[in-house]
Image (spheres, helix red, strand yellow):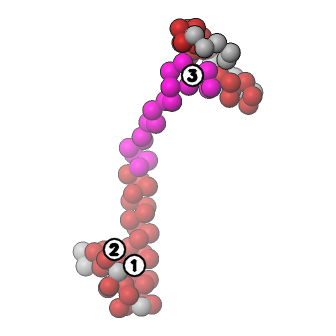
Amino acid sequence: MESSDFGTIKNIGSQLRKASRPNDDVQSKTYDDCLVAAFGEPEKQTNVSELIIKIQTTAAELETNCRELLIAAPETAVSNPICKDILLK
């Protein structure tokens, strides 16, 4: 965009919002840049379900790793604050 008139930028951005995003990489980048110039960076949407699954997976991996550490080096596992909490629950 070559215009520094914010009203024009916002007007074009509003028109672009109604249009479908181009498939071409160069055009889609320009499309995205225009929307950012008009409305700012979009807020990142958090998918709660995916986040919960990710937390559960990470927790399971931590528990497995701490149990492996307990077998390999019991003193280290018990002295590690994270593993200590997991192993004593």
Tell me: residue 36, above or below residue 73: above
Q: Nearer the viewer, mark 2 or mark 1?
A: 2
Q: In percent of the image, x 44 and y 36: which residue is there?
A: 45
Between the C-alphas of marks 1 and 3, the distance is 48 Å
User: x, y percentage for residue 30?
Assistant: 68, 24
Camera-side residue: 38 or 84? Answer: 38
User: x, y percentage for residue 39?
Assistant: 50, 21
Type of amino acid at the residue the image marks with label 2: Ile
Asked where in the image residue 63 lies, by quadrant, the reply is bottom left
Q: Main secondary structure of the magenta part?
A: helix
Q: In the rendered structure, which disc, 2 or 1, sits on the residue that comes first in sequence?
A: 1
Camera-side residue: 15 or 51? Answer: 15
Q: Nearer the viewer, mark 3 or mark 2?
A: 3
Q: How many marks?
A: 3
Between the C-alphas of marks 3 and 2, the distance is 44 Å
SS under mark 1: helix
Q: In the rendered structure, which disc, 3 or 2, sits on the residue that comes first in sequence?
A: 3
Does residue 38 belong to the magenta stretch? yes
- The magenta segment is 32-51
Name the residue beneath numbered marker 3: 37
Name the residue beneath numbered marker 2: 82
Between the C-alphas of marks 2 and 1, the distance is 8 Å
Tell me: residue 78, above or below residue 6: below
SS under mark 3: helix
User: x, y percentage for residue 2?
Assistant: 68, 15
> Left or right: 19 with respect to 25?
left
Tags 2 and 1 touching, CB below 8 Å: yes
Q: In percent of the image, x 44 and y 77: which residue is there?
A: 65
Name the residue beneath numbered marker 1: 66
Badge 2, how many Cα within 10 Å: few under 14, some, many 20+? few
